Image (cartoon, rainbow, N blue to C red):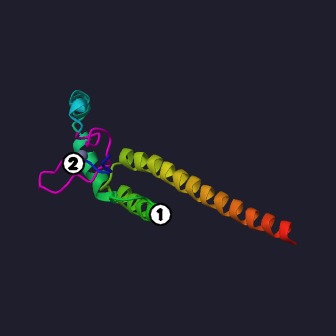
Amino acid sequence: MASHCRATNRAGAPCSAAHFRGGWCRWHDPTLADERRVFSVKGGKARSNHARAMKVLPRDVLDVERVRGIVGQTIRGVMKGDIEPGVGNCLANLLRVALAAAETSLLADLDKRLADLESIADARKVSA
Ligand SMILES: [Zn+2]
């Protein structure tokens, strides 16, 4: 499964949005064309919001440092008026999910390390 969308933007560069299904992101998935039309009729802002959001988002996994960087960029962008507050809110929600995922991954890692240490300690008890 691809991690990124297979579409290209108007400049010919690969779409940087995350893969949704069938090799497409939510903005390029052909089966969502009708929804997108409805979306763009509602103020015609979906495309520009997507482009603004994509400028802020990096392509790969978000670690805590990257999340901090994006939060900073987003705050500055909203305050300067380059990023609409709604896009800022959306990013804030997604970044909370990214942080929760990073935390879950860290806890799983700590859990494994603890289990390893416990098995080492148990092995020493048996031999002592
Ligand atoms: Zn795409």
Residue 77 vertical placement versus 124 (above, below): above
Residue 79 vertical placement versus 86 (above, below): below
Indicate which disc residue 68 carries: 1
- Tell me if mark 1 has few (under 14), some (14-19) or many (20+) residues whose alpha carbon lies within 10 angstroms of its own: some
Residue identified by numbered label 2: 6
Range covered by the magenta-colored residues:
7-28
Q: Nearer the viewer, residue 62 or 54?
A: 62
Residue 95 vertical placement versus 76 (above, below): above
Q: Does the segment drawn in magenta span residue 120? A: no
| Magenta stretch: dominant secondary structure | loop
Q: Residue at x 28, y 57 (%)?
A: 55
| Residue type beneath disc 2 | Arg
Q: Residue at x 78, y 66 (%)?
A: 123
Residue 56: image location, x then y, percent = 33, 58
Q: Does the segment drawn in magenta span residue 9? A: yes
- The reply to whether callout 2 and callout 1 are in contact (CB within 8 Å) is no
| Residue type beneath disc 1 | Arg
User: Which structural element holds mark 2?
Assistant: loop
Q: Residue at x 74, y 62 (%)?
A: 119
Confirm or reject: label 2 Cβ below 8 Å from ligand 1. Answer: yes
How many angstroms separate mark 2 from mark 1 (CA)?
28 Å
User: Which structural element holds mark 1?
Assistant: helix
Q: Nearer the viewer, residue 27 or 40?
A: 27
Q: Furthest residue to the front?
A: 127
